[in-house]
Amino acid sequence: AAPEGWHLATSEEWNTMIDTLGGQDVAGDALKVGGGSEFDALLAGGVSNPPEYDTVWQYGNRSVFWSTEEGNPPEEVAFAYFLADNDSAINAVGSAKNFRHSVRCVKD
């Protein structure tokens, strides 16, 4: 999922960035396009439950980024980081692995 020389962000890497930007309650605003950080998250929405539903949801209003941390049960759930246009926070959430979310790549 990541180009050579890069890897998907771990939860530890997400949390380090969030802490650097002032913590979970305010880092969401800094991470969005124009927020002043070096990461400009587009609120790209997502695509859920392929193939039977395969619908784009919340384009322009929300974005969810995968981490490498698995949830419970690990074969079905992984942790992701959720941003919303009307919320300054960024929150870790468990998400079904069959949802198609955005990814953040980190240089090795």
Image (spheres, rainbow, N blue to C red):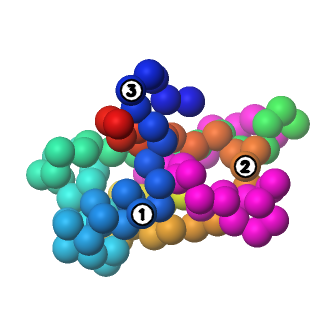
Q: What span is in magenta?
A: 53-79
Residue lying furthest right in this view? 52
Is residue 28 toward the left or the right of residue 36 in the image?
Answer: right
Q: Is residue 6 visible?
A: yes
Residue 38 in the image, given as x and y percentages of width and height:
17, 45
The amino acid on which the numbered mark 1 sits, given as a three-letter code, is Glu
Q: Quadrant of residue 42?
A: top left
Q: Which mark is residue 5?
A: 3
Disc 3 residue type (three-letter): Gly
Q: Which residue is mark 1?
A: 12
Q: Compared with residue 32, is residue 91 higher up or lower down, i.e. above or below?
A: below
**Label 2 crowding class (10 Å Cα cut-off): few <14, some 14-19, many 20+?**
some
Q: Residues within 10 Å of mark 3 (few under 14, many from 20)?
A: few
Q: Amino acid at mark 2?
A: Lys
Identify the residue at image location x=64%, y=40%. 100
Does the rendering let one see residue 88? Answer: no
User: Is residue 105 shown above or below 64?
Assistant: above
Name the residue rendered at 64%, 65% in the picture.
Answer: 94
* Nearer the observer, 5 or 63: 5
Q: Which residue is mark 2?
A: 97
Location of the N terminus by quadrant is: top right
Q: Position of residue 21 (x, y in %)?
A: 20, 66
